[in-house]
Image (cartoon, rainbow, N blue to C red):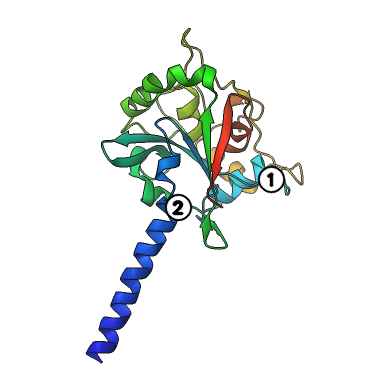
Amino acid sequence: MFIKNLSFALFLCIFTILQACNTTKNYDELRDGDLLFIVGKSKSEQNDAIKKSTSKKDEIPFSHVGIVKFVDKDVYVIEATTSDGIIQTLLYEFMQKAERRKRKPLVAVGRLKPEYQYIIPLAVEKAGDQLGRPYDYAYEEGNDAFYCTELVRFTYLDSLRNPIFPALAMTFKNKETGETEAYWKKHFAGLQLEIPEGKPGTNPVDMFKSPVIDIVHEYY
């Protein structure tokens, strides 16, 4: 029995190491300031509502984005999370949040085009300065909180201190039915706010298609 349990433990250890290698084998593909677009595997109502209100059936339903930051030999992702606000997460842990297709994480790497590369050092520094700030449940620009793409939008600034990612009209309606998702009705009612339909904002699917970035790698 002891040998059987030991063998199983060794199997789990080897499996975990292989999984880690599989999801981090492209560390050398990443650079400071890259954007990681992810299809979250969370089964939460919010994650589902984000996917349905920002992507169509023929699109990959990216629901989250984070900012790559290198610290010595470690790779981190600065991200806005509903549970902990703005945090810095190890890359491996970030990748574990992704839905998988054929055992590969649904994560894509966006990189600023050459003409915007000069902004990266200040962008990453500015994003790091936001650590500890709360998540923006109101999805409202101009407050002291951030949702994931809002964090990117207001830290990636050009030489005139203007966002290189323009705001778009937000929608909280299902892309297929045209009806407002029930989750959003409940969410904003709980905050005693009107749904900010049409107000300026951003989302991972539209940012993924932005002309200011190139998609340089896909993990799936």
User: Does residue 100 lie above or below 171 as drawn?
Assistant: below
Say which amino acid is labelled 1: Glu
Q: Residue furthest bottom?
A: 1
Q: Quadrant of the N terminus?
A: bottom left
Q: Residue furthest top?
A: 160
Tell me the element at label 1. loop
Q: Position of residue 85 (x, y in %)?
A: 37, 38
Quarter of the image holding residue 204?
A: top right
Tell me the element at label 2. loop
Provide the residue designation for mark 1: 59
Quarter of the image holding residue 32?
A: top left
Q: Position of residue 81 (x, y in %)?
A: 42, 41
Residue at the spot 47% in from the left edge and 17% down from the top edge: 157
Q: Position of residue 11 (x, y in %)?
A: 34, 76
Estimate how packed mark 1 is, as few (under 14), some (14 to 19) or many (20 or more) residues with alpha carbons within 10 Å.
few
Q: Nearer the viewer, residue 51 or 4?
A: 4
Q: Which mark is residue 131?
A: none
The reply to whether residue 43 is visible in this rendering is no
Say which amino acid is labelled 2: Lys
User: So how many labels did they put on this image?
Assistant: 2
Q: Residue furthest front?
A: 28
With 172 as the anchor, is 192 left or right in this view? left
Estimate how packed mark 2 is, as few (under 14), some (14 to 19) or many (20 or more) residues with alpha carbons within 10 Å.
some
Label 1 close to label 2 by CB (< 8 Å): no
Q: Nearer the viewer, residue 140 or 100?
A: 100
Provide the residue designation for mark 2: 97
